[in-house]
């Protein structure tokens, strides 16, 4: 969290208050936005269904009874379990049946042994749990039949053999065992030796530690789709205690969606990561290679994109990356959301794809009666009803290959307040539209589109690139032509924000971040197709040639945030922190002069004035911090062996 502490700053609120007459100031607490991949709160443990018959959590102070294991009963005739009254869905990944209050899965024999991913998301919750429509966890598993039991085993890809048919792979198989996550008695056998199990114990799923109370929990619905099954559960946890007035229950209730997803039958070829280009990644250990050591392998997380016309330099994809706008997004902001998503198309053209990114409204029931926003096959942008000033871009990937399977951005409602406050203290001096709060919808929509583009970048596989903004000469930030083309930084994945450097009279009108040179480069590096390369190793020649462009062009370089490198700071702009801050201080003095007029109306209190004054102090502290990091700092540039004659680490010069 970036706390903006104004306690040591000398801008006087008393001086400002002398210009106004209304008394009273309320506190405001700015928070750090855009956490990227991480959701606003740590994800709870991954829920998995317990073995049927597991007792629920006993009252506090008692010990659970010891229950000896019992052999499963013999399977019954199919018609005795799946009766004529059953409500059945016979299409999809597996058949599902509802008989009274029980739900059954009918698992076809070919599905046994295949790898699936269990994905849990929180659809609805009480506010102290976090927020609905957010991630809980995911895990790879497979079914295994053992007698008249169906075992659910956990699958790990953390260790792999270089030769899947060699001695080392046999050693891995002999030395490791897949944990049994749950065991289900076979209720019946169906056609083609399909296996019927009672799926109802899902209501006991221990989502937040304690087991759900079966008397206050139930399955809402089960839907089977071609590649997955979606189970919606309302679960309540808590205790029931006896007192003078009788039994009293306490409980917390949530709605959880469990998607059981078949991993791609034809795994995508992975792409090896490169420390010079920023990506979210998947790591594993490779054993048995030619280097005679256990080797750490890192692959990037990216969507599968294939050209419709492999011979074309630029082709539409076989399947575009499609984002749907969630039903809760306010209509007035949908156009801005769509612009923010599809802004990435210019980057994908560099990788050889036209119209690679699409943003659509949800289909109507007539257009697609089976569509469900909770179906993990669909990427849906969600609008969260929260006072948090935040947004984030998660993704779900296949651990075998890094293929992104879902990337649903989350936009918190109060992000509108945050981007408004930022723009006011950073850019209002050059944009008359921003000198009175609240902003007009047109301007707010532009700011929202920037947030969406940034978060969609995360869902495409891109982490923050804090080096990007420092590659831009300060003079370019004052150039109307340059800023019109590139905005404020070399990557929209930086934390550069709006142009606080440009001065009145420079004529700069494009004051927000845009897709930048690094974004074009990173997309080309990660999503280009190399038809002659049949293995990840064979791609390295092409990828190294692309990465070598960084040597001559600093705008193509990547770097994480650093407290020692003045070129990898957050919230900074330009290649000279001293000059950028000197210009920024001038603009803050100008903004201070019209701050009361921008925030006060007759009859109101000083809450908004206090909020924006604190925001202005916070901006001042950030800019001054960019100068302090120069002292004793060192610049890091990620060169690989033989790439450059310059060292990777260079102390900031004494003169600077």
Image (cartoon, grey):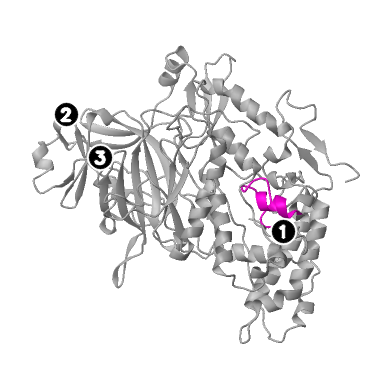
Tell us which disc is closer to us: 1 or 3.
Answer: 1
Rendering coords of residue 569 (x, y %): 72, 48
Q: Is residue 314 left or right of residue 186?
A: right
Tell me the crowding category of disc 2: few under 14, some 14 to 19, or many 20 or more residues within 10 angstroms, Cα based.
few
Give the residue number, with chain letter if any, for mark 1. 508
Tell me, for residue 130, which label it has, or none. none
Residue occupied by mark 3: 92
| Residue 396 x/y as whole percent | 45, 41
**Cα separation between marks 3 and 2:** 16 Å
Q: Secondary structure at mark 2?
A: helix
Q: Return the disc, 1 or 3, that comes first in the chain's sequence.
A: 3
Quarter placement of the N terminus: bottom right
Q: Which residues are magenta?
A: 479-500
Q: Is residue 445 above or below residue 318?
A: below
Q: Nearer the viewer, residue 1 or 301?
A: 301
Q: As drawn, is 458 to the left or to the right of 121?
A: right
Which numbered circle lies on residue 192? 2
Of residue 379 and residue 374, the one placed in the foreground of this image is 379
Secondary structure of residue under mark 1: loop
């Amino acid at each position: 969290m970036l706390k903006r502490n104004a306690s040591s700053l000398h801008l006087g609120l008393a001086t400002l208050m002398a210009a106004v007459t209304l008394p009273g100031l309320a506190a405001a607490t700015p928070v750090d936005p855009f956490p990227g991949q991480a959701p606003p709160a740590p994800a709870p443990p991954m829920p998995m269904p317990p073995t049927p018959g597991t007792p629920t959590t006993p009252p506090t102070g008692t010990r659970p009874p010891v229950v000896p294991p019992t052999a499963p009963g013999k399977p019954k005739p199919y018609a005795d379990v799946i009766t004529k009254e059953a409500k059945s869905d016979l299409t999809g990944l597996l058949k599902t049946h509802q008989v009274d209050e029980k739900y059954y899965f009918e698992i076809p024999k070919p599905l046994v042994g295949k790898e699936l991913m269990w994905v849990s998301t929180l659809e609805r919750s009480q506010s102290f749990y976090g927020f609905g429509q957010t991630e809980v966890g995911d895990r790879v598993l497979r079914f295994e039949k053992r007698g008249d039991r169906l075992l659910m085993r956990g699958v790990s890809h953390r260790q792999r053999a270089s030769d899947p048919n060699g001695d080392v792979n046999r050693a891995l198989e002999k030395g490791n065992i897949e944990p049994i996550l749950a065991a289900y008695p076979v209720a019946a056998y169906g056609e083609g030796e399909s296996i019927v199990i009672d799926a109802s114990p899902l209501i006991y799923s221990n989502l937040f530690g304690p087991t759900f109370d079966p008397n206050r929990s139930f399955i809402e619905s089960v839907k089977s789709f071609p590649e997955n099954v979606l189970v919606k559960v309302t679960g309540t946890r808590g205790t029931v205690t006896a007192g003078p007035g009788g039994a009293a229950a306490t409980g917390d209730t949530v709605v959880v969606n469990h998607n059981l997803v078949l991993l791609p039958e034809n795994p995508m070829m992975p792409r090896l990561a490169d420390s010079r280009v920023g990506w979210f990644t998947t790591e594993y250990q490779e054993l048995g290679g030619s280097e005679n050591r256990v080797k750490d392998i890192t692959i990037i997380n990216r969507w599968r994109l294939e050209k419709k016309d492999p011979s074309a330099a630029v082709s539409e994809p076989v399947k575009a990356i499609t984002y749907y706008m969630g039903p809760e997004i306010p209509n007035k902001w949908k156009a801005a959301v769509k612009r923010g998503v599809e802004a990435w198309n210019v980057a994908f053209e560099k990788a050889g794809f036209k119209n690679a990114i699409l943003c659509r409204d949800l289909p109507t029931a007539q257009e697609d009666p089976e569509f469900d926003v909770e179906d993990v096959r669909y990427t849906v942008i969600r609008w969260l009803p929260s006072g948090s000033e935040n947004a984030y871009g998660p993704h779900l990937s296949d651990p075998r290959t890094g293929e992104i399977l879902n990337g649903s951005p989350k936009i918190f409602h109060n992000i509108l307040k945050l981007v408004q406050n930022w723009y006011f203290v950073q850019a209002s001096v050059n944009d008359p539209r921003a000198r009175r709060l609240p902003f007009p919808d047109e301007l707010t929509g532009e700011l929202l589109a920037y947030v969406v583009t940034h978060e969609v970048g995360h869902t495409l596989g891109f982490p923050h690139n804090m080096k990007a903004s420092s590659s831009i000469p300060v003079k370019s930030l004052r150039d109307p032509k340059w800023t019109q083309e590139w905005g404020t930084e070399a990557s929209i994945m930086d934390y550069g924000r709006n142009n606080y450097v440009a001065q009145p009279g420079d004529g700069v009108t494009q004051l927000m971040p845009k897709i930048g040179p690094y974004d074009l480069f990173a997309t080309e590096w990660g999503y280009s197709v190399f038809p002659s390369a049949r293995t990840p190793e064979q791609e390295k020649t092409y990828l190294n040639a692309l990465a070598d462009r960084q040597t001559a062009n600093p705008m193509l370089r990547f770097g994480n945030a650093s407290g020692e490198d003045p070129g990898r700071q957050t919230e900074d702009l330009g290649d000279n922190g001293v000059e950028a801050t000197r210009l920024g201080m001038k603009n803050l003095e100008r903004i201070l002069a019209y701050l009361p007029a921008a925030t006060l109306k007759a009859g109101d209190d000083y809450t908004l004035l206090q909020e924006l004054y604190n925001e202005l102090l916070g901006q001042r502290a950030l800019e001054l911090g960019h100068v302090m990091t120069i002292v004793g700092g060192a610049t890091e540039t990620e060169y690989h062996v033989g790439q450059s004659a310059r060292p990777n680490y260079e102390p900031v010069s004494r003169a600077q």
